[in-house]
Image (cartoon, rainbow, N blue to C red):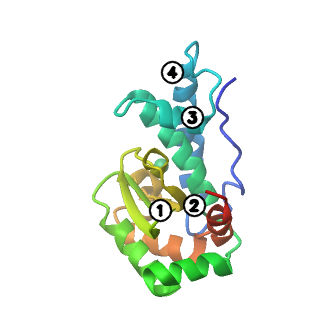
Amino acid sequence: MTIEHAPLPYPLDGLAPHISERTMSFHYGRHHAGYVASVNQAIAGTPLADAALEEIVTAADVPSALFNCAAQAWNHAFYWDSMSPDRVESPSGELLAALERSFGSLDAFNAEFAAAAVGNFASGWTWLVSGDDGLQIVNTDDADTPLRHGRRALLTIDVWEHAYYLDYQNARAAYVDAFVEHLINWEFASTNYAQPA
Ligand code: MN3
């Protein structure tokens, strides 16, 4: 069994003009595909050969090449699902209430999430996660992922330069604004929030 490079949940040009078809063809078609291929190469003939991707991410030594490619494979699939061409304006009632408890309001969350993503001084990721103490915004470096820290991810944005450089060059803030204003898939985040612990 091998790890699947799952199809995108929308066409390559589905997120345009906010994220171009060209960016998606490199990001999904080359970067993400490369991580998936590296995982499959690394697990072949090992005890993890038949494991699910989540198991590989949590079983891999950190740091290790296997962790890096497995976590990046998982993170990217989660990122594609975190966006939608059809703007889903707001979270479910339960998630909205949780966001209001933790951040004050949806607008305050949006501003705090954008500031964290712009300020993440790394090739990394910015996440909305849920845990025992409510909702939090978390930045991770490189391939690091909430899966490894026992936190449930609800939403993520990739802030590695390859995610935005073709469309926005060094203007990460413009990419982050487009994500927050036009691309967040609140239905996906709400479904993740509603899952039993
Ligand atoms: Mn990426």
C-beta proximity under 8 Å, tags 1 and 2: yes
Rounded to the nearest angstrom, the CA distance separating label 4 from label 1 is 33 Å
Instruction: Give the image quarter of residue 165.
Output: bottom left
The reply, left or right, for residue 5 in relation to residue 46 is right
Rounded to the nearest angstrom, the CA distance separating label 3 from label 1 is 34 Å
C-beta proximity under 8 Å, tags 2 and 4: no
Residue topped by disc 4 = 42
Viewer-nearest of discs 4 and 1: 4
**Which mark, residue 167?**
1
- Mark 2: which amino acid? Ser
Residue topped by disc 3 = 55
Tell me the crowding category of disc 3: few under 14, some 14 to 19, or many 20 or more residues within 10 angstroms, Cα based: few
- Mark 1: which amino acid? Asp
Give the mark nearest the N terminus, 3 or 2.
2
Tag 3 secondary structure: helix
Tell me the crowding category of disc 4: few under 14, some 14 to 19, or many 20 or more residues within 10 angstroms, Cα based: some
- Mark 3: which amino acid? Glu
